[in-house]
Each structure stands twice: as C-alpha cells, then as structure tokens.
Image (cartoon, coloured by chain):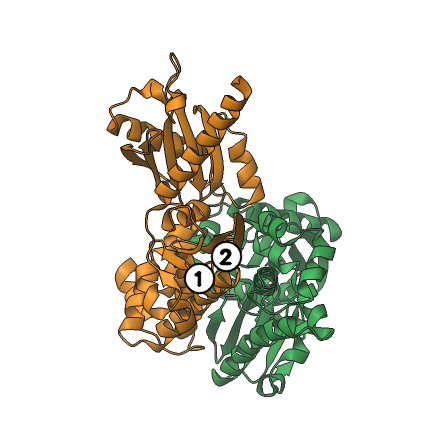
Chain colours: A green, B orange
Amino acid sequence: MIARRTAGRVQPIYAGIDGGGTRCRALLADARGVELGAGSAGPANPFQDPRQAAVSVVEAVEAALSDAGCAPSEIGNVVACVGLAGANVKSAYERMVDWDHPFCDMQLTTDVEIACLGAHGGLDGGVVVVGTGSSGCALVDGEWHYLGGYGFPFADKGSGAWFGLEAIRAVLLDFDELGPPTALRGALREETGFGPLELVDFMSGARPARFASIAPLVVDAAGSGDAVAAGILQDGSAYLSDLVVRLVAFGAPAVALVGGLSRKLLPWLGEDAAARVVPAQKSAEHGALLSAMHSGEAQTRERGAGDS
Amino acid sequence: MIARRTAGRVQPIYAGIDGGGTRCRALLADARGVELGAGSAGPANPFQDPRQAAVSVVEAVEAALSDAGCAPSEIGNVVACVGLAGANVKSAYERMVDWDHPFCDMQLTTDVEIACLGAHGGLDGGVVVVGTGSSGCALVDGEWHYLGGYGFPFADKGSGAWFGLEAIRAVLLDFDELGPPTALRGALREETGFGPLELVDFMSGARPARFASIAPLVVDAAGSGDAVAAGILQDGSAYLSDLVVRLVAFGAPAVALVGGLSRKLLPWLGEDAAARVVPAQKSAEHGALLSAMHSGEAQTRERGAGDS
C-alpha cells in the first residue's frame, strides 16, 4: 500500500455502491479502508430503468463525497464497485457496463454478490436476500454460486412482491367465493381504501415495489391467525429455506438472511435452514467497498509489475 | 318489425362485435336477423390499449360493411353491441364508453357476456371463457353473475397466460435444481431458442398474449407424461372446474367452455364440472348481434310509444 503513495500520483477514493429498486447507497473509504463518508439517492435497478440507475449511482457517490468533505471533481478519482439489483439479467448488465461513468474505474456486479461479501467480510459464505425480490448466492473457494433472482413475476418466490401478488390473488378468490375467506381482504381495503375490483385497477402495471408494499399486511395477518395469510407465508418461506439449504450444499459454511423482509421471515424458516443462518457482519455497500479495494490492489500490483 | 319500415327512415344495420387481446370480429345483420357480412381487425382490449381498441372495432365493422357490399358511409346507420375483453375493469370501461364512436348507437359490454349470449342463444346459461385470460359469467332470470376475469397476473388462473407463467416458473426451479426436472425446459428451449436466463430477459414486460403462446407446450408436455406440466394443468383446470360448478350454483342450467384453449382443457375438467358442460350454440359476435338487435327493438318500441 505504501508503495502507492508515489510522488505526484493522486490517491484514489474507494466507493462501495449498493443499488436497489427503491434506493442506492454509497460508502467511501481511503486506501487503508478508513471510511470517509456515506450518501444515498433514488432507485438503481438497471433492469427496470438503466438511465435512472446511472443517475442514482452518481448522485449517491456525489452525496458521499460531500459527506466526506471532498470536492465534486474528486469523482474522477473514485474506484467504484457497483452492485445492482437486476444486473444479473444479461441485457441490463450490458446496458450498465457500457455506461460512460464518471469514475476512475468501475466494477459492475449484483446486489446479491456484494451483500454476500459484506455479510461474511469477503470470506466464504452464502446470503439469501429477501426484500422486494428474492435470490441467493454463495462464495465458496473463490467460486460464485447463484440461485433465483430472475425477477417478478417469473420467480422471486418468498419476496415482498410475491407476497403482495399472492395476497391480491387470495383476496380475489375470497371475493368470488372460490377460495376461503381471509382477513387480507379487510386489511387491504383498510390500507388502500380499495375494494377488490378497484385494487386490480390500481395495481395494473404496478412495479414490484408496489406489490411489495402489501407484504407486511400478509405477515401481520398470519401473525393474527389468518389461515390464508399463514399459508402464503409458509409457501414463500419454504422456498427461502430451500435456498439456504442449497447454498449450504454448495459448501457455504453459513448463510445470512438479509433485506427488508429478512427479520420478519426468519421465524418462518424451516429447522434445517434456520440452523445454518447467521447474522450479516456488515452491509452490502461494505461488501462492495471490499471488492473495490480488492480490485484497486490488483490494479496496483499489475501496474507495479509493469513499471518494474 | 314491419312498423319500422316507415317512409324516408333509413333502416339500421345491426353489428355484433367481439374484441379480444389479439383480434376483433364484427358480424352484421339486418332487422330480420339476416346476416349481411363479417369482418375482422387487430386487437381490441381497452385495458391494454383503449386507442387501439377503438381503431380495431371501427376497422372490423368497416371490413364487415365492405363484405356486405355496403358503402363505408353506412357506418353511421350501424347499431352496435361491442363486447370487449378488459371492459370489466372500471377505468377501461369508462374510457371506451365515452369514446366518440361513428355508429348510430353503441352498447358496450364484456367479451364474456356476449360469449354467454351466443352460447345459449340469449337464454339462461353460463360460460367459462379460457383463452389468453380466464373468466366466467352466467345469465339467470335476467340477472348477470360474474366470476374472475380480473386480469393477469392477479387472477386468470387456468388461462393461457397463467399456464405460460407457471411453465416459466417451473423451468427456472428446475434450472436451479430447486424443483423437479421437467420436459418443459427442453420444450421451451426448442420453441424459443432460449435457455432459462435468456427466456426471462425475453419475457420481461411481455403482454399476456406472449405468455399464452407457451400454453400449448404445457398441454403437450402433460400429454407426454411430464409430471410437472400435468400438475400445472390439473391446478389450472381445477380452478376452471370451480368456475363451472359455481355458475351452476347461481342457477345456470348448463355452462359452455369457450375460447382458444377450451378444447384442449375439456378433458382436464373435474367430473362435476364436465357433467354440466355443453357446446356453445353460436359465437360471441353472434351473441353481441343478439344484444344489438334487442336494444334496437327496445328503442323502436320506445320511439313508437312516443310517436303515438
């Protein structure tokens, strides 16, 4: 590291960036890993909106630079690792990786991968992310393994969006008297002010995040003994449990359950899965920061080798 | 009827119009019910695209007028009944009903209602429509009863779009080895040329019709003994069976199963449902035509009463 303090060379700033469907967070550190500042901005899911994702990433870094007391022009010295929800989809990845970003260097990966790095401090382990979407990954002996994360409504079982969709389906079946009565019907009316038919109109073409906003009602109704809500929770949680068990089978010593719904769903995991779940050590943006610093070191080594 | 042939009054032309997510069909008749001509045009689902729906309805009637050897200007003498998929959704209905149409008179209803009128010649009975979407309705003692039809992906279980989505879900679970292997994976690759991940990209934001294009693969795979495909077919068909049984409970003497997937799904219905299913007598555009002529008669009676 000391070798990088060569005369006349500007010190890079490392940035870990975690972008999701609702928010984007950036964390800055110097070459020694000392945190300099943090910032956040709007949504950054390139699968949903690549232009918005690019804007949010830059705004989050600008906010973090300001928080760190750095000049805005310092963005050109930033070595960034950006983990984005939706970047596992090929077309979204390609759009973002070709982006004419303002950083000195940028590494693009998924939100799940940086969550895994953050959860286990860069060491071997797995992570199941359950927020608006759901997916899992594990780092084992330097190799990445991925599960799910194909997006709503194809996959993302056990995610907020999936719980929201299942809740609406159950309410409509109840309305038609083709399914059992459920407290979700009253809960949804109270929350949104809409009856079943207006709800369909309101939710038509809605993004996953709007579906996910219904998920807490399902957890609450299940907690209050509603059998339909409990059935939905069990079904979704069984999938999340399968993710944990399979990541362990890949060789992950432990798996962290992270994301907005993780705390609420932890009690619903199966025994096999629950036994392998550990708390995450650090956040996804910390994981991205680790990766940015790692790539910076690698470049310095390469540059050093070339210079000699 | 003879009373309407008053001197100088132009005879109306009656039009029955059936609009769906892929095509719009029009059928013309004179006041005695003699068919004059038929025509078709593009999609007419006001929930998906109200402007396109209006264009398709007019184009279908224009084609039918041309088929009948009538001048295009005769469109102003047309008394139309238009049954549209998606018109059960309030916002879509309101957009269409306020439309500045070129007809002498227009009555707006749903595709399901006119299918029911066509299937039972305007008499009491029920219908389950299963094509891109699924829904049911019954006319009993002058009263309409509706089930389902809330649209994809909220409802429409047992529909083409639903079978397509479930097939993709099953293929992704197989891909992750989190679900049983299924022949659908090979079938989808052969049909589309895409592996599971490219498929997600291709289907992202797809309209229900594209999902529904996958449905025949599910029927074929189930027929060839694929347990996953058979499970999906059974699950969807159980819902359609529930629709039939419930329409009978409303008082429908019999229920017709109509729509693009009806023939393929008939063998999968439960015994209770299958025992009450009858073939449809006539098409949905015939049903709409019945309704147009009925409204024309009612108007003539009213006008006659006013004149006297």
User: Looking at the image, which is closer to me, A262 or B111?
Assistant: B111
Element class at badge 2:
loop
Label annotation for residue B154: none
- Residue type indicated by callout 1: Gly
Q: Position of residue B165 (x, y in %)?
A: 43, 61
User: Looking at the image, which is closer to me, B139 or A234?
Assistant: B139
Q: Quadrant of residue B223?
A: bottom left
Label annotation for residue A306: 1
Q: Quadrant of residue B54?
A: top left
Q: Position of residue B286 (x, y in %)?
A: 35, 41
Q: CA distance from mark 2 to mark 1?
A: 56 Å
User: Looking at the image, which is closer to me, B65 or A77?
Assistant: B65
Identify the residue position indicated by label 2 in the image. B153
Local packing at callout 1 (Cα closer than 10 Å; few below 14, some 14-19, many 20+) is: few
Left or right of B132? Residue B63 is left
Circle count: 2
Same-chain check, marks 2 and 1: no
Q: Residue at x 62, y 77 (%)?
A: A256
